[in-house]
Image (tube, grey):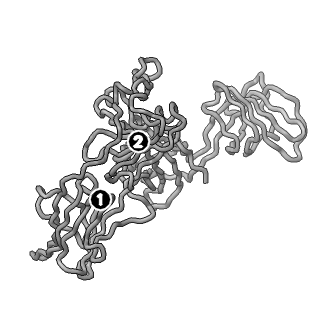
Amino acid sequence: MFIQSLSYSPLEASYGIKLSFNDINPADKKIADIISASRSNRISNIGLSSAARPIASGESFKIKSSTIPNSTVPAIDNSFLGTFKPSTVTYTNGQGSLTFYQESASDINTISVVGDLYSIANIKPREFYLVQFSIESIVPESAQITLSPSSYVIGGAESFSPVTVVQIKSLYSKTSKALIKMLIKDINTNTVLKTEYTQLIVSDSSAAPCEIISQDPVDQSYIYLDIDNNWKYDYQGYRLAEFIPPNEDTVVKLTKKNVRLLPNRLDSNRIKIVIDPIKTANYNISIDQIRSAILSQYATIQNSFALANLGNKSYDIVVSDVLLKPEDLNNLVIAKYPPVTGLDIKFSEVAKSEPYAPDIAGIPEVNLLRYYNDNNITYLGEIHFDNTIYLDSPVVVDYNGVSFSGNLQTATQGPNYLTEI
């Protein structure tokens, strides 16, 4: 099954993308006038005029006699009538031609004729159709995506194009990918009549290497806090989480984060780039545009990645390169504003670069975990965590053979009541 793939910028995706699927034809529909016909060595050639849309190679079509007879131009020969699939197609501004193979058909010299070219019905006719749109997948999973509308009803036998508006905002990277499913049903019987998919790619980095910054890797889902590690999670000397259990059998599971989003003591030969989110918004510039400009300018750069706006800080990029110095980036042109015809926007106007320094350990947040049922409150423990890493992240507590889940929150919100799973 062929799935079309469409690319958009993060700005376009955040405002909303009008997503159209293939035309739905409950009945044959005229798409062009036939003005000439010929055949040589079983290859038929049809000339077209007033074509309503391009005809794709491999798309089946139907040739019929003209519904408007012309006394001065002969009707197309009956040997051309029928349903065929073109082998070649040309099309320019409503004019074009197509060829197809006909077995055991006599040669006919090119002549002017009148006839009609029809598209073929691609769905069974129904009184009413239910059109539904759904999100099959989104990468990264943390990206926010909405469909509007998610469904609607359409009636009659006229052709129509299923349309919805998709809005995508990625929380941890400006790059994302989504697979959208379109489904058409008979509203009276709930029978599925047609299914179609479209893939949406959101990125400013089509011309340069780009990494999707995923909050959670797929190789391992959880970090475990249990008796074996004394209910502590340390990384490079940073205490990211510590659990005070109600008993020795209690186990806590936290989502394992991408290590590039975790605090770092110090890496040599690195530059930290702090991007001003207000200035980039004013110029409609994304973090991926800045990253792409750097990668395009400095071919020797070995590695680059985003530190995903942790704790509502400015966007950060860390660049690894032995030869690059912070001041080298100041005059780098990032984009034009307005786009294409405007003035050059330089790196120094939207960001600053500085030597990369170790991260400072944050003050831990405290979360009291509880379970409420039938007016009884069960104490599930107390967890201390780095809120720049785990605030609002999922947490699972295995207690006395039962699992409870929720999201970590701040102490100001009071006890955190989890849900049994």
In the rendered image, the residue lying farthest to the left is 375
Lower sequence index among marks 2 and 1:
1
Residue at image point 47% right, 46% down: 211
Q: Which quadrant of the view contains residue 223?
A: bottom left
Quadrant holding the N terminus: bottom right
Q: Is residue 116 left or right of residue 213?
A: right
SS of the residue under disc 2: strand
Q: Give residue 209's mark.
A: none
Q: Which three-letter amino acid code belongs to the residue tagged 1?
A: Gly
Quadrant holding the C terminus: bottom left
Q: Are marks 2 and 1 in contact (CB under 8 Å)?
A: no
Residue 18 image point, x, y percent? 43, 38
Q: Is residue 379 left or right of residue 18?
A: left
Q: Give residue 237's mark.
A: 1
Name above or below for residue 136 compared with residue 287.
below
| Residue position for label 2 | 270
Q: Is residue 221 visible?
A: yes
Crowding at mark 2 (Cα within 10 Å: few <14, some 14-19, many 20+): many
Of 47 and 197, the residue lying toward us: 197
